[in-house]
């Protein structure tokens, strides 16, 4: 692995953890518990398009583990990990088809992140009624995915050369 690529990994991982920390500090003015902006996903989407899916997966995993251990505890880590894995799988598959824009891929990521969390929550509390909460989270996933996709699209315009 080239030294420049390792430096990018470190830079992007640090940026993703920083974005996760900022997100924890900024309250979302929505009365629905669990709704977050997903600021760290800007970094994951940028890496997905700037580098490759493998690199984006690695940075996403590092970010989820570090943010979970530092800011959320084990339960938060479990929810975040399930959402991140499902979200990443959906985004990587949609990007690979070449039929979706960055914004479309990001919206799918927001939606599938929430689906993953609801599935784990339903399993954790052993109550399928958690699915009633899903429409609210899907709506928030679309809105936040749209915003994150637009930010990532703008950020990619400023990245010149690939590592």
Image: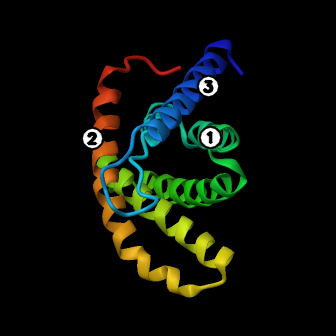
Identify the image quadrant of residue 160.
top left
In the rendered image, the residue lying farthest to the top is 3
**Scheme of image coloration:** rainbow
Element on which disc 1 rests: helix
Label 2, on which residue? 150
Give the Cα separation between the discs numbered 3 and 1: 21 Å
Quarter occupied by residue 83:
bottom right
Label 2: element kind = helix
Residue 68 is situated, as x and y percent measured from the top left of the image, at: 65, 45
Which of the pair 163/87 is nearer the observer?
Answer: 87
Looking at the picture, tell me which residue is in the foreground, 78 or 108: 78
Labels 2 and 3 touching (C-beta < 8 A):
no
Point 43% across, 82% down: residue: 132
Please give the name of the residue rendered at 46% of the width and 33% of the height, measured from the top-left corner. Answer: 22
Distance between mark 2 and mark 3 Cα atoms = 23 Å
Q: Are marks 3 and 1 in contact (CB under 8 Å)?
A: no
Residue 19, percent from left and from top:
48, 32
50 lies above or below 122:
above
Disc 3 versus disc 1: nearer the observer: 1
Relative to 2, is 97 on the left or the right?
A: left
Q: Is residue 48 visible?
A: no
The answer for how far apart the CA atoms under marks 1 and 2 are is 27 Å
Sequence-wise, which precedes: disc 1 or disc 2? 1
Residue 125 pos. (x, y %): 65, 78
Disc 1 packing (10 Å; few <14; some 14–19; many ≥20): few
Q: Which residue is mark 3?
A: 9
Q: Position of residue 23 (x, y in %)?
A: 45, 39
- The residue wearing badge 1 is 71
Q: Earlier in the sequence, mark 2 or mark 3?
A: 3
């Amino acid at each position: 692995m080239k030294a420049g690529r390792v430096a990018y990994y470190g830079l992007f991982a640090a940026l993703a953890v920083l974005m996760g920390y900022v997100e924890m500090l900024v309250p979302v003015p929505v009365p629905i518990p669990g709704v977050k902006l997903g600021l760290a996903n800007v970094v994951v989407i940028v890496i997905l398009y700037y580098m490759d899916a493998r690199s984006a997966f690695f940075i996403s995993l590092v970010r989820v583990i570090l943010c979970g251990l530092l800011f959320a505890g084990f339960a938060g880590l479990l929810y975040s990990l399930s959402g991140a894995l499902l979200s990443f799988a959906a985004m990587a598959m949609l990007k690979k088809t070449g039929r979706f824009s960055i914004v479309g891929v990001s919206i799918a990521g927001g939606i599938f992140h929430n689906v993953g969390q609801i599935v784990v929550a339903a399993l954790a509390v052993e109550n399928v009624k958690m699915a009633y909460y899903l429409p609210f989270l899907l709506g928030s996933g679309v809105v936040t995915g749209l915003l994150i996709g637009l930010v990532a699209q703008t950020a990619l315009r400023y990245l010149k050369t690939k590592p």
